[in-house]
Amino acid sequence: MNYIEHINTALQPSHPIGLRAVDLFAGCGGISLGFEAMGIAVDGYEMDPKAASTYNQNLQGHCFTERLTLTTSISNGYDIVLGGPPCQPFSVGGHQKGVEDDRNGFPVFINAIRNIQPKLWLFENVRGMLYSNRDYFEQIVTELGELGYRIEYRILNAVNYGVPQNRERLFVVGHRSSFNYPPPLTKRTTVGEAIGDLIDTTIDESKILTASMDRYVLNYEKASKCVNPRDLHLNKPARTLTCRNIAAPTGDMQRVRLSDGRRRRISIREAARLQSFPDWFTFHGTETQQYYQIGNAVPPILALHLAKSVVQCLTSNEYSNNVLLESPPLSIGAQTMIVFEQ
């Protein structure tokens, strides 16, 4: 089965297994999609109406269009709480204001854990949270640990889980038993496997780089001392997709070279495939809004691997042995620590 067939089938919703999750700051539903594919019923909360509309168009659960606050009432009938608290406060692109940024969603996330008391919770964020804002990260871990959870965290690269993209993100899990992060796969998926069939067949002339844009890109690469052109290479995974480098014609934009030598920005569908969204998943909103939904998402195939580990943690050995990991990774234990994938 090739990559496209895999994402189109593996991410279909599975038969319910009796676990319920709520996805806070859900975006268009990348992490929810992976959890639904494991048979977990998921509801979402998202303040962007177009992203929430995308979620409701494609997923089985319902996404509430609402800006979460400390006074938001969320049902306590969930086994799992998922979340991607807005990462701009901790990302380089977001100027790393951290705790002082009014977009910081962690007080809401912690409050939800306190009120719901789920069996397990998981959140995703950018690597930068561990560096410029390390003290605040440790404060978050301490507060969540005081609610009765063992906490473990790792930097995971999506490329190690079948996503055709180098994308490192921080994943933090709180549980009350034993949790094993999914083991990395041996095979890496390339850009060619993901979008090779689209490059010369779905040409949008508006995305072709003009002569002036080509000169701009060349000057950008010289100024940034770029050794290799930033074009996507069919025999390699892609660079990290971000809102900025897929939504706008910038110097570091994600771009492909056509067979006639011209270059162009990638399309919505190409960006979606590079994030492991299936072809049946459709996006709502303007083109820019759709690119932002894709760039902000957790790759659904990576979410599926994490969901398998969550199910293993929360269900019986009999069930786990039938559906889950071939060989568990290092168990970190009760102590919080960071593990970087090689």
Image (tube, rainbow, N blue to C red):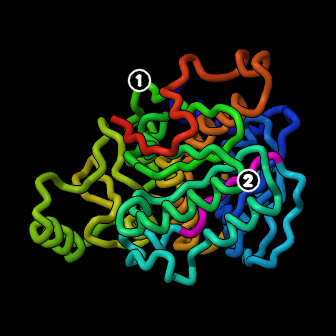
User: SS for tag 2?
Assistant: strand
Measure how far apart labels 2 and 1 are at the Cα level. Answer: 30 Å
> At 34% from the left edge and 72% from the top edge, which residue is drawn?
249
Mark sitting earlier along the chain (2/1) = 2
From the viewer's perspective, tell me whether residue 270 is left or right of residue 175. left
* Percent of width and height locating residue 187: 41, 25
The residue indicated by pointer 2 is: 81
What is the x, y in percent for residue 218? 14, 67
Q: Which mark is residue 186?
A: 1
Residue 104 falls in image quadrant: bottom right
Question: Observer-nearest residue: 308 or 203?
Answer: 308
Task: Using a 10 Å C-alpha cutoff, classify the residue at mark 1 as few (fewer than 14 neighbours), some (14 to 19) or many (20 or more).
Answer: few
Residue placed at 68% from the left, 36% from the top?
A: 310
Q: Nearer the viewer, residue 315 or 323?
A: 315
Q: Is residue 278 visible?
A: no
Judge whether residue 122 can be spotted in this image. yes
Secondary structure under tag 1 reads loop
Q: Which residues are magenta?
A: 79-86
Res. 186 image quadrant: top left
Q: Amino acid at mark 2?
A: Val
- Taking depth in this image into account, of 102 and 282 the one nearest to the observer is 102
Q: Position of residue 17 (x, y in %)?
A: 85, 33
